[in-house]
Every structure is written in structure tokens, then in C-alpha cells.
Amino acid sequence: MNPMDRARRELETLPAAAGNGLLHRRALLRHGAALAGAVLGYSVTPLAFAQQLTEDSWSRGPGTVVPEAGLRSRFERDVVRTLSNPKGEPRTQHARTPHHLVNGTFTPNSMHFVISHAGDPDIDPDQHRLLIHGLVKQPLVFSLDALARYPMVSRMAFVECGGNSAPLFSPQPIQATAQALHGLVSCSEWTGVLLSTLLDEAGIDPRAKWIVAEGGDAPHLSRSVPLSKALDDAMIALYQNGERVMPSNGYPMRLLLPGWEGNMNIKWLRRIQLTESPGMTFYESRTYSQVLPNGKAYQFYFLQEVKSFITHPSPGLAMKGPGFYEISGIAYSGNGRIAKVMVSADGGKTWTQAALQEPVHSKAFTRFRAPWRWDGGPAVLQSRAWDEAGFSQPTRAQLVAARGQTDGVPPVTAFPSQHYNAIASWSVAPNGEVKHVYA
């Protein structure tokens, strides 16, 4: 018996770490090669490999000309964002990240989620300016060239819409992909100038307690931010994953507030005013004030709390029969690093700890993975994350009790629609179909 066959036989005898066939995360390390062969369902013999190298049509002649800007393979044309307003009608536009079709921890720039209330402005970077004024000792105006002269830093950070996962407030589970349910969150490496550096140069008046940041798009969307956050880890982001920030994500500069709700990360940033009190601007007063079951509302709710969801398998990705699978997903928290992720295959009756893909960055996506030996029977997959501050995801029942749920009657009530971070559940049927369920 060759070593690979021996390892696979050993896999078959591994004891489950939790109910319904979940294996210990150490199986990924100790039996990685055998597990990969079992999960993928094939093995390559030396003869077959040689034939593949010599007989494939694409290896018989030169390929296409290398373009100036790289393009994805034509076979990946279905890996795209879904659009809520593809014709650009005069209303908000959404573009959702296809989490079930991508992997890793960083989101490609072209796949980063977008919410735009009036389309993307075509800003000339040579003409664009950032004004810092209000309760400062010396108002300052910065061009893009001027900002480029300051020391730059990079931050790996997720950005999440406060309304991401809002469909899970529905009284009945909505049948849709992870893209439709959780697609308003993405993660990038952002590079730019710390806002504290610019505020220090402007000189902060002791009366200042808030900043009001304003964008250069047609609605001039603005949000109030506590000065303490501005002096902590806020950034004027100029680059996204190594290239200039994408137009839909705020070109030529945006405000980045790691871990705080997405609408506060003002795109197309043009003005920062230091003030004694919050501006109580249109969007923060109307749209982002969470109404609670007792009839009261949050005045402000900034933090994106600890959260996770499984991307593989997930609705839209059918299972191919009993055997070994890798359960994989993303976890993140506005409180800092992810400390651990637990995975269940029996609807939360039993759990095993998933492996976290290194490095684990603060306030950024962390990819988790867990080996699973599916026996072909019904299963309910769940993940639950903990962050380094000790917070964990609530159950859906706990979250709904605290924040309510929509009435489910068209037109569905507008609230609650913000800050959903409860455990998400996918059911797996014997035929391999994966559905969204409440468990």
C-alpha cells in the first residue's frame, strides 16, 4: 500500500471531534495531502500528468498577447458582483461581493462591495482638495500631491455596511446565496495618511469633541465621528490593495474608520470639520438610527460587532455526495482580532474549533477552515466567532429579542435593518442542496 492510500485509510478511521462527522482541525495539518485528495475526489498518476502536459491544446502554441492591465480568465466571467440597480435609476445602487465564489481573506478591488446613493462622481484628482477646518488653530487644504508627501501606513481592514445581512431580520429565512445575504462586506489593504497626523498639524481646539466628514458626491453625504476615533486609527486612504482607491470606493481619497459601520467611512472625501457636538446630519438621523422593539432608537451605533458566516459550502454551491469536505468561511470584528471560531454540523448541538488561517489581522477578515466527513444525511452547518475582547456572536433568537425583526409583509418595514451579526445556518439535504435556514 502506497503512503497516500495508507493516509486515506487512516482518514476513514479518524474519530469525529463533534457530531455529524466534524473532524478535529489538526486533521488539516497531519493529513493535509490525503485530505486534499479525498476532498477533491481525484488523484493524478505520473502517466496521466505527463499526458496532460503534452496533449492539452493550449500548450501547443503561443497564447494571447499580454495586456497592459491584467484581466481575469474568460472562464471566471461568472464571478461578479450582483447589482440592485443595474440601469442606474435615480436611487441607491448596491453591488454585492460574491463570497461563495472567492476565497482567501482580501477582496479583489473589482469585487469590493459598493453602495452609492447617486452614482460614482468622475473626480479629477488634480482638482480635488481636502479641507480641514472648524475648531482648529489653522485651517488646512490638501491636494493629492500634498498628502502624498506625508508618512504613509497600511491597514488591513474590512468595511461593512450597517445593513449587511439585514435579510436575516425576516421572520422566515430568505432563500438566497451568501452573496445576497452577506455581500455588503469586503476586506482590503488600505494605504494612506493617518488622520491624526493631519489634525496634529492643523492644531486641535480643546473644545473639539467630534468631526463631521463630508463627501464630494452629489448628495454630499456626511457623518459625525467622535474625535477619539479620528485620533486613534482613522486614515485618509489613497490606495486599495496597492493601487489607487477604486472610483466606486472613493477615488481619489476616502475616510477609513477600521471596524466602524461602512457609511461612516466617507468616500470621495472633501471636507472634515471639527465641532463641539455631532452634526446630526440627514443619514445619521434618518437611516442609521436603529429602532428597537421598545420603540426607542439608538442615537448612534458605530461598531461592527464580531461576526462570521460559512462561504463553502453555502447556498448555491451544491454538495457532490458523501465524503470529505472542507467547511470554510470568514470571521471579523470591529473590536480587534478573531480569537477563535467554532463550527457545528448538527445545528449547534455539538461544536469543534476551526483552524484560523494566519496571519490573523485586527479588524480584518480571518479565514477559518474545518474538515468534515459528510455521511450523506441531513446536516445544519453553523459557525460562531469570538474576538480578542471576549465578545461572541449571539444566536438569532438572542439578537431578535434585543433588536426585533421585520414584519415580513410587503412592503417590509424599514427597521430593524442594521447591525445583524447573529449565527447564520445552512442546511444540507441528502441530495446535496444547501439552503438558508433558522436553527
Image (spheres, grey):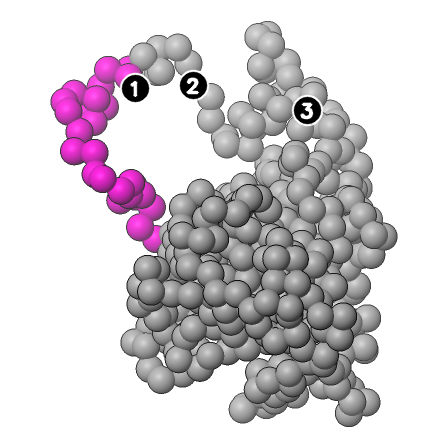
Q: Percent x, y for residue 330? A: 62, 49
Q: Which residue is mark 1?
A: 52
Q: CA distance from mark 3 to mark 2?
A: 21 Å
Magenta-tinted stretch: 51-78
Which quarter shows the N terminus? top right
| Nearest-to-viewer mark from 3 and 2 | 3
Q: Is residue 280 visible?
A: yes
Which tag, 3 or 2, sits closer to the chain's start?
A: 3
Residue at coordinates 59% horizontally, 46% vertically from top-left? 155
Circle 1: element type: helix
User: Horizontal placement of 97 versus 369: left or right?
Assistant: left
- Residue lying at the far right of the rendered structure: 390
Q: Is residue 1 left or right of residue 10?
A: left
Which of disc 3 and disc 1 is earlier in sequence? Answer: 3
Disc 3 marks which residue? 29
Q: Residue at x 33, y 82 (%)?
A: 89
Look at the magenta stretch and give its main secondary structure: loop
Say above or below: 321 vs 206: above
Question: Magenta stretch containing residue 120, yes or no?
Answer: no
**Residue 206, quarter of picture:** bottom right
Q: Hey, what amino acid is under mark 3?
A: Leu
Quarter of the figure with residue 439: bottom right
Looking at marks 1 and 2 on the same chain, the residue that comes earlier in the sequence is marked by 2
Q: Nearer the viewer, residue 117 or 107?
A: 117
Tags 1 and 3 touching, CB below 8 Å = no
Q: Nearer the viewer, residue 309 or 225?
A: 225
Report which residue position mark 2 lands on.
44
**Residue at the spot 53% in from the left edge and 25% down from the top edge:** 37
